[in-house]
């Protein structure tokens, strides 16, 4: 029987706490895709007696991640004394015989190359910058194990498989469009991570929001962000004395406004989860079509009206200054026009 190693050839990297805009920062352990199955027969020892089943499995097959073993449990791939058990909390006893089918899971098959049309606005042997369309998930996760930008990067260039997360160093939410920089080598990835940690990568966004803009044309929002204590699916501005969170700063400039909507330019100084969406809500200007944060559809927009339109940084290898831009996509431009706003990027 041929065995397989779900962890072979895949590595992770520790990214700085403000590297990214995604709720998926703590990526689960990943496994290499395979179609082979190995049966492991194990016996619970005195050391595991009384332990949870998933904990006992980690002790008995430590080369596999707890996440992967829990997925096997959910797939009914584990037997305890000839009985299928799916609950990770099941308590095992001394002498119990565990039969575990080491087989592919949805997650283990997610890191596969999938050819897709990528809008590459810059590329050299060290890195590339892509213009991500709205609707494209960046990294495989529950509910989206395939068809992600990572899958496309694995097909785009051979070196992607040797770089953690295929070189992805920051992300955009699924329904946010715009520019992302991706490393093509491990050395470049480490350098880009350092640039982002030092806040030497400038990321600028356009957003359409509800209500007439009032107050100063430029508003610097310096408000910490953490998980919303009333709704764990959302983020919120929090009081750090009472709730966990991180400092967050966004400079927001109004480019145009009507009685009902405004077009704003946002410059990130940090990269917290949903930062712009949360800071705009804190100003009582939820983004158009951002249902999670109370924004209604308008101007034909059916996804949050947020676009990463400019990206600038010093090339981590050559030192050359890179200034990249991406025009808003058609739905965004159409909404600007229908809402009676003016777009003048210069």
Image (spheres, rainbow, N blue to C red):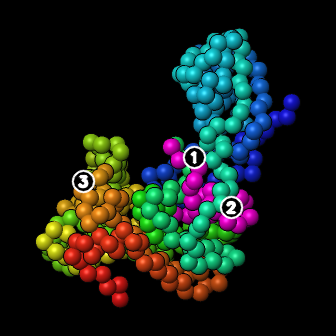
**Residue with the mark numbered 3:** 294
Disc 3 is placed on an element classified as: loop
State which quarter of the image contains the C terminus. Answer: bottom left
> Depth check: 24 or 296 in front?
296
Whether pointer 2 and pointer 3 mark residues with C-beta atoms closer than 8 Å, the reply is no
**Residue drawn at the location 59% of the way across and 66% of the way down:** 117
Q: Earlier in the sequence, mark 3 or mark 1?
A: 1
Could you tell me residue 286's position as x and y percent?
Answer: 24, 60
For residue 286, above or below residue 87? below
Q: Residue at x 72, y 27 (%)?
A: 101
Pick the quarter of the image with the N terminus.
top right
Q: Is residue 248 toward the left or the right of residue 159 in the image?
A: left
> Which of the two discs, 2 and 3, labels the residue nearer the N terminus?
2
Image point (77%, 25%), residue name: 39
Query: Dot 3: within a 10 Å radius of its alpha carbon, few (fewer than 14), some, or many (20 or more) residues?
Result: some
Dominant secondary structure (helix, strand or loop) of the stretch shown in magenta: helix
Residue 155 is marked as 2
Magenta segment range? 143-170
x, y (%) of residue 209?
Answer: 25, 66
Let me know if residue 177 is in the magenta part: no
Look at 68% across and 52% down and name the residue there.
112
Of residues 255 and 194, the one drawn nearer to the viewer in this rendering:
255
- Residue 342 visible somewhere in the drawing: yes
Q: What residue sits right under mark 1 in the picture?
A: 145
* Residue 51, label in figure: none
């Amino acid at each position: 029987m041929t065995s397989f190693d779900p962890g072979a050839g895949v590595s992770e990297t520790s990214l700085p706490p403000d590297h990214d805009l995604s709720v998926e920062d703590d990526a689960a352990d990943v496994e290499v895709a395979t179609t082979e199955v190995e049966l492991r027969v194990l016996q619970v020892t005195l050391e595991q007696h009384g332990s949870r089943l998933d904990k006992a499995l980690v002790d008995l097959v430590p080369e596999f991640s707890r996440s992967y073993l829990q997925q096997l449990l959910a797939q009914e791939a584990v037997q305890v004394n000839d009985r299928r058990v799916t609950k990770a909390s099941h308590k095992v006893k001394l002498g119990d015989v565990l039969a575990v089918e080491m087989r592919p899971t949805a997650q283990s098959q997610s890191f596969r190359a999938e050819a897709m049309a990528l809008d590459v606005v810059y590329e050299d042997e060290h890195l590339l910058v892509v213009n991500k369309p709205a609707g494209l998930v960046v990294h495989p996760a529950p509910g989206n194990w395939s068809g992600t930008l990572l899958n496309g990067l694995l097909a785009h260039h051979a070196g992607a498989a040797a770089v953690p997360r295929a070189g992805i160093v920051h992300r955009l939410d699924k329904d946010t469009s715009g520019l992302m920089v991706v490393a093509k080598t491990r050395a470049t990835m480490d350098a880009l991570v350092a640039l982002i940690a030092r806040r030497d990568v400038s990321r600028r966004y356009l957003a359409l929001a509800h209500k007439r803009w009032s107050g100063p044309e430029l508003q610097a929002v310096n408000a910490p962000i953490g998980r919303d204590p009333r709704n764990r699916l959302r983020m919120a501005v929090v009081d750090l004395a009472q709730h966990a969170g991180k400092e967050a700063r966004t400079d927001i400039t109004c480019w145009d406004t009507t009685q009902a909507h405004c077009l704003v330019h946002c410059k990130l100084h940090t990269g917290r989860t949903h930062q712009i969406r949360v800071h705009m809500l804190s100003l009582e200007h939820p983004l158009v079509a951002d249902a999670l944060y109370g924004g209604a559809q308008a101007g034909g927009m059916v996804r949050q009206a947020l676009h990463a339109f400019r990206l600038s940084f010093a090339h981590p290898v050559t030192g050359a200054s890179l200034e990249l831009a991406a025009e808003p996509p058609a739905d965004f431009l159409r909404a600007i026009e229908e809402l009676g706003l003016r777009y003048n990027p210069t």
